[in-house]
Amino acid sequence: MPLQMLEDGHEERLTSGHYGLVHLYEDDQVGPQYFQHGVQVLKSGRPFILDNSVFELEKAFDPVEFVTWILKLHKASHTDGDNFRYIIPDVLDDADRTIEQALDFISKYSKDLPGEPMVVVQGNTSSDLIECYQTFRREGLQRIAISFNCKGYESDLASKSSHLSYRYHLDSPHSHLTDWAIGRINFINLVENYEMSKSIVDPAPKLHLLGASLPQEFKAYRDMFIVESVDTSNPIVHGLKGQMYSREGLDDKLSIKLVDLFNMKEDEIDKHLAIIYYNVARFEGFVNG
């Protein structure tokens, strides 16, 4: 949400934690305030996930600089990092490079960093996605993130699920957004079935869902034991633009990134606060029933 909303305390009322975009710490205008907000979240004990900003930058933040900001947060907060997770820099739609980069980062840095690492599954095909997940699984990683917009969802994972389109209102109109939503549902179903086939003495990782195409997708995860958390600005962004969720969700998504609204002023925000709170409540209903 915009910095003004963070400073006005809306994050505590609307969310269960903080999701930080690391590249904003380097912004001359908002960086210092945003960093201090992250420090206060760590001190409060609320969950904090630090993202590598790959969605915003279209390539992940520099790993060395990423480590520097993790250590700065830790030093400024004087906390042990129990409520802190960080998303290791990944490569959009490239399973091989994502695996290589993640394992290299873990071997170089993770032992000396506070908090817990989270890796991201990437892939250009469904086979890539499966191989990426299983590789991280074999490495014993317990926090795995699943993006909302992988190219790997757009082929067979999206094409074989007309019943999902109807059940979760993902068929009107058909678009790449519905392909992404259906593809991720199918992929996570594959992962859960894979985990259910494994021994009970080998506990499954917990999945974090990165972002949203259409909010009604999250109805599909209510009963999945493997899905733990989600981050998205979807209900906030649409609320800031005066767009209210229907009972079914959305038929389309505004092509605006939250980061482009980050400096929105208080008077602009206040005009839409009621819609924002409504959308978040509706989204929580999609997620938890």
Image (cartoon, grey):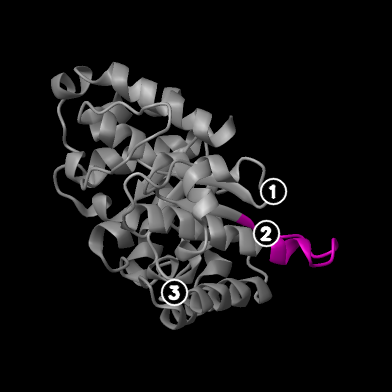
* Dot 2 and dot 1 residues touching (CB under 8 Å): yes
Residue 192 - label: 2
Q: x, y (%) of residue 135? A: 60, 77
Q: What element does badge 3 sit on?
A: loop
State which quarter of the image contains the N terminus: top left
Q: x, y (%) of residue 263? A: 16, 36
Q: What element does badge 2 sit on?
A: helix
State which quarter of the image contains the C terminus: top right
Residue 282 - label: none
| Residue type, mark 1 in image | Phe
Taking the spot 45% from the left edge, 83% from the top edge, the residue there is 96
Report the magenta stretch's main SS.
Answer: loop
| Residue type, mark 3 in image | Gly
Q: Name the residue under label 3.
A: 123
Q: Mark 1 points at which residue?
A: 225
Say whether residue 127 is magenta.
no
- Pick whichever, 60 or 132, lies toward us: 132
Magenta region: 193-206
Above-or-below relation of 45 to 146: above
